């Protein structure tokens, strides 16, 4: 089914023509992943707000909340980090695996539960934690005691004796080959590793080299744990350039282009430690135009971050981020189609599913997501949209979970939220509308002004007869052209005189009522 869907959408059955475009500037660095010229992933890192997800800290337990089953840990930030009891259970102690002592006899390992956590980490005790979710809004970071260090092909877990293989590697023969490699690795006792998806098809020597690097990294952290005072950072995730080499640069990437010579040389050096042949794919860009404009990235970024995103078929999706969830609405728009209405709806929904999965990655949207697709009568069509969505979400590095389309035509999904969405990083609430996206109409403001004038003139009818109103010119135009009679009626009723002055600096909804003779404010 998925092959037919791909053909209908004009999608290639295999990923080709992938490029990494890096723009490194003084204030921020950006990386874009292009697939056949189409923007698929986009990341931004600013000097003033480095990503702390993955960083390891030595913190101190400040207080324990039994009702929340959580503790708050001081790791040196303004807001204390949140550590749930489940995230504080040492993975190695809760594995349920029998431990073999030096004499060779087996003894069952005690299972740790959440009830034991307050005694393991009492208030005032030091604790080593790793950030799993950065500060979002007014919430502090979320942390765990189960540390993990990501390498190129392996993830090292120093407090876990479990080893495994990424679930995204589905080929059983390959999984068996990788299991054999893991068994032959010289892994210290009490340490676990996971083979990353990028390790598929790689030779054993790459894993040996990666393991050695990660063990050296952990040894440095262990030394800092003994020497440094609380609170302090023990390990920081690489910057955007370093993470790009580690996470993005796979065999699927045909070319890497960077506009900063120092960053380019640094990448070549880092890649050379992994694969000398791959260094030839990294190039320095020194053109006159900005690199994102040369490769058509900037226009795609500008188009992708609108509230309304158009689809090739003429339909469009509308994305609204709220505090609790993200709502996405699918509309046919200009795609009226021909006689076959069901085919038109399916085409629109399929393109919408493809675009929604892309938008989640581009905007780094996380949490609960509800997509309202156009109603489809055929269960087969609903399954086609669901299958495409699942396939496109498989490309996402963040953990996702999606449910089939419900009877109401809604698709519910969740996406791992490790940090604020890109829109929160780039944009802030409009100071004019206060983030609502709308302002009151001139008529609404005129009605409120009339109501207020009626109250003020009744109150001061015996003492103040000349009243001045200062307001936005747009509302003043409305008063002159359409509401003049009602203003004359107010003057006649209270034996007063009204004068108006437009001020372009005034908000569309704001007006000030003053005594025309003294300038004293009567209402603001």
Image (spheres, rainbow, N blue to C red):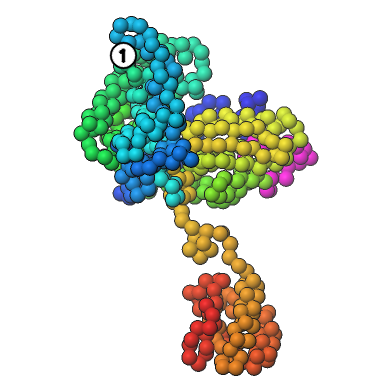
Q: Residue furthest left?
A: 227
| Residue 383 appears in the picture as rendered | yes
Q: Does residue 341 appear to the left or right of 294 in the view shown?
A: right
Residue at 50% x, 74% y: name it: 506
Relative image position of residue 327 (x, y in whole percent): 60, 46
- Quadrant (top left/top right/bottom left/bottom right) for the N terminus: top right
Please identify the quarter of the rendering in which residue 2 is found.
top right
Q: Which residue is mark 1?
A: 186
Q: Is residue 484 left or right of residue 33?
A: right
> Is 252 rendered above or below residue 284?
above
Counting from the top left corner in percent of width and height, residue 346 is at: 70, 36
| Left or right: 427, with 231 as reference point | right
Q: Which residues are magenta?
A: 332-352
Q: Quick one: 415 or 140, which is closer to the camera?
A: 140
Q: Picture coordinates of residue 267 (x, y %)?
A: 30, 33
* Residue toward you, 123 or 507: 123
Q: Is residue 258 left or right of residue 313?
A: left
Residue at image position (57%, 45%) is 326
**Vertical placement of residue 142 versus 436, above or below:** above
Q: Quadrant of residue 142?
A: top left
Question: Magenta stretch: residue 336 in it?
Answer: yes
Residue at screen point 35% across, 24% down: 159
- Is 261 colored magenta in this rendering? no
Question: Measured from the top left, where is residue 296 in percent x and y?
Answer: 46, 44
* Local crowd size for mark 1, using a 10 Å CA cut-off: few (<14), some (14–19), many (≥20): few
């Amino acid at each position: 089914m998925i092959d037919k869907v791909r053909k209908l959408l004009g999608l290639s059955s295999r990923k080709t023509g992938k490029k990494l475009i890096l723009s490194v500037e003084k204030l921020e660095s950006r990386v874009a992943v292009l697939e056949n010229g189409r923007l698929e992933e986009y990341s931004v890192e600013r000097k003033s707000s480095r990503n702390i997800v993955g960083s390891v800290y030595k913190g101190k337990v400040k207080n324990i909340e039994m009702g929340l089953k959580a503790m708050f840990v001081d790791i040196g930030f303004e807001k204390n980090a949140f550590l749930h009891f489940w995230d504080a259970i040492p993975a190695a102690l809760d594995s349920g695996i029998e431990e073999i002592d030096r004499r060779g006899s087996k003894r069952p390992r005690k299972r740790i539960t959440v009830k034991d956590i307050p005694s393991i980490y009492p208030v005032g005790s030091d604790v080593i934690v790793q950030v799993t979710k950065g500060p979002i809004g007014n919430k502090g970071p979320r942390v765990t005691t189960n540390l993990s260090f990501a390498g190129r092909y392996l993830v090292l877990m120093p407090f876990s004796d479990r080893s495994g293989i990424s679930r995204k590697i589905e080929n059983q023969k390959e999984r068996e080959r990788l299991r054999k490699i893991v068994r032959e690795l010289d892994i210290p006792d009490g340490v676990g590793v996971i083979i990353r998806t990028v390790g598929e098809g790689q030779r054993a020597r790459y894993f040996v080299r990666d393991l050695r690097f990660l063990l050296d990294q952990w040894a440095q952290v262990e030394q800092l744990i003994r020497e440094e005072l609380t609170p302090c950072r023990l390990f920081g995730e690489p910057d955007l350039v370093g993470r790009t080499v580690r996470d993005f640069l796979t065999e699927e990437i045909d070319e890497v282009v960077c506009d900063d010579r120092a960053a380019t040389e640094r990448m070549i050096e880092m890649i050379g430690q992994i694969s000398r042949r791959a260094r030839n794919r990294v190039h320095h860009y020194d053109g006159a135009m900005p690199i994102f404009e040369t490769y058509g990235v900037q226009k795609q970024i500008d188009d992708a971050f609108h509230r309304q995103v158009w689809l090739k078929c003429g339909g469009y999706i509308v994305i609204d981020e709220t505090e609790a969830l993200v709502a996405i609405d699918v509309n046919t728009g200009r795609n009226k189609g021909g006689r076959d209405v069901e085919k038109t709806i399916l085409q629109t929904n399929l393109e919408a599913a493809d675009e929604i999965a892309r938008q989640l990655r581009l905007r780094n949207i996380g949490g609960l997501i509800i997509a309202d697709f156009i109603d489809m009568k055929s269960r087969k069509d609903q399954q086609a949209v669901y299958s495409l969505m699942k396939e496109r979400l498989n490309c996402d590095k963040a953990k996702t979970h999606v449910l089939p389309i419900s009877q109401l035509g809604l698709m519910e999904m969740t996406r791992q939220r490790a940090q604020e969405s890109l829109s929160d990083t780039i944009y802030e609430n409009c100071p004019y509308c206060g983030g609502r996206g709308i302002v009151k109409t001139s008529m609404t403001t005129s009605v409120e002004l009339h109501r207020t004038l009626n109250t003020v003139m009744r109150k001061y009818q015996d003492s103040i007869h000349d009243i001045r109103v200062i307001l936005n010119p747009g509302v003043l135009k409305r008063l002159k052209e359409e509401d003049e009679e009602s203003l004359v009626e107010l003057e006649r009723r209270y034996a007063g005189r009204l004068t108006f002055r437009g001020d372009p600096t005034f908000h569309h909804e704001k007006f000030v009522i003053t005594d025309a003779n003294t300038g004293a404010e009567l209402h603001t």
